[in-house]
Image (spheres, helix red, strand yellow):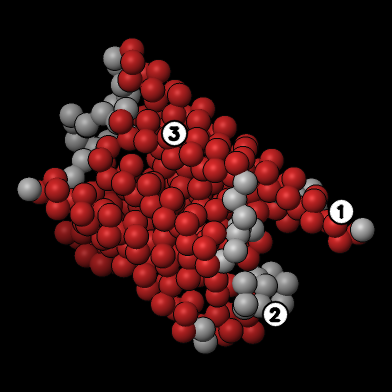
Amino acid sequence: MVLVLGILVAIVATACMNYGVFLSKREVDRLPRLGAHSFLKTLVAFFRSKLWLQAQALQLLAGMLHVIAIGLAPLSVIEPVDTAGISFLVILTVIYLGERAGWVVWLGISVIITGVLFLGISLVRPTHPFSYRPIAVWFFIILLFGVVIYSFYVAFSRKDGREASFVGIGLGVLVGLNAVLIKLAWNDVGHLWHIYHFGSLWRSSYAVMAFLGSLSAQFFFQMALQRGKAMVVVPLVTGFSNMIPIVVGVLALKEPFPTEGKMVLLRLLSFMLIIGGAVLLSLREAKERKSVSATGAG
């Protein structure tokens, strides 16, 4: 009964999240372009938009429901349900936003969803209390922040038609890293709570970074939606944001890795599929941009 309830909550969560993304995408295309106008005027325009605020409220509600769902059911069950919501978003964008989805886009989305499903199936339930390797944790924090910065740099400095794809990859890595920081922050705050109470939130470097990361992710997500198709951006973000916590969890947070041969292969295959799907979407986005540019020049 609890498992069924967890799945139902997860379904509602992913529906709210993807419908919120759909509303956000529909509205941000009408709002001033982030990074191209006065930041203050752009910010005011966003917060004056009732539809955009409704979209953010839906996504916030989805995040809280997702946390509840994870508490009711295993992560290996919840994550595939969460990822399947991408299909709902694609249908909405095709019907209501007029985004055209060729076979390469559908293939890329399907490959990423399959990769995340395999990732969920190959998860192993922890058998020991939470602990981590500090040196390895900080290595990954620095490395992944570097990947985020490089992805955004490439996105905004090159004009080869892959801007939205690189923003999606950078954002996916940022969201995935932020999930790791939140987990580390819970551990920090839990140890400091009996001394500092709410003051422990800003005494934890992980909590501070997680808060700043959440704000940055939300900003860049709106920017990504303005610069590319939702059906390209969201699968990239979902794929990488699911993969990063698993990789860092195994290598730095002492979370278990599959030991059975089939599960090991499934885990490795999941990584290949997520990255491969990202490449497919990236190539498709570049091709479409070049096609549009050629038509305009003609």
Question: Counting other residues with Cα less than 10 Å from the Cα at mark 3, is it few (<14), some (14-19), or many (20 or more)?
Answer: many
- Does label 3 or label 1 sit earlier along the sequence? 3
Which residue carries the number 2 mark? 38
Residue at 69 percent of width and 69 percent of height = 35
What amino acid type is highlighted by mark number 3?
A: Gly
The reply to whether dot 2 and dot 1 touch (C-beta < 8 Å) is no
User: Residue 115 — which label?
Assistant: 3
Which residue carries the number 1 mark? 294
What amino acid type is highlighted by mark number 2?
A: Ser
Do we see residue 124 in this rendering? yes
Do we see residue 40 in this rendering? no
Residue at 62 percent of width and 77 percent of height = 30
Q: Secondary structure at mark 2?
A: loop
What amino acid type is highlighted by mark number 1?
A: Ala
CA gap, disc 3 and disc 2: 40 Å
CA gap, disc 3 and disc 1: 34 Å
In the rendered image, the vertical position of residue 182 relative to residue 275, given as above or below: below
The foreground one among 29 and 212 is 29
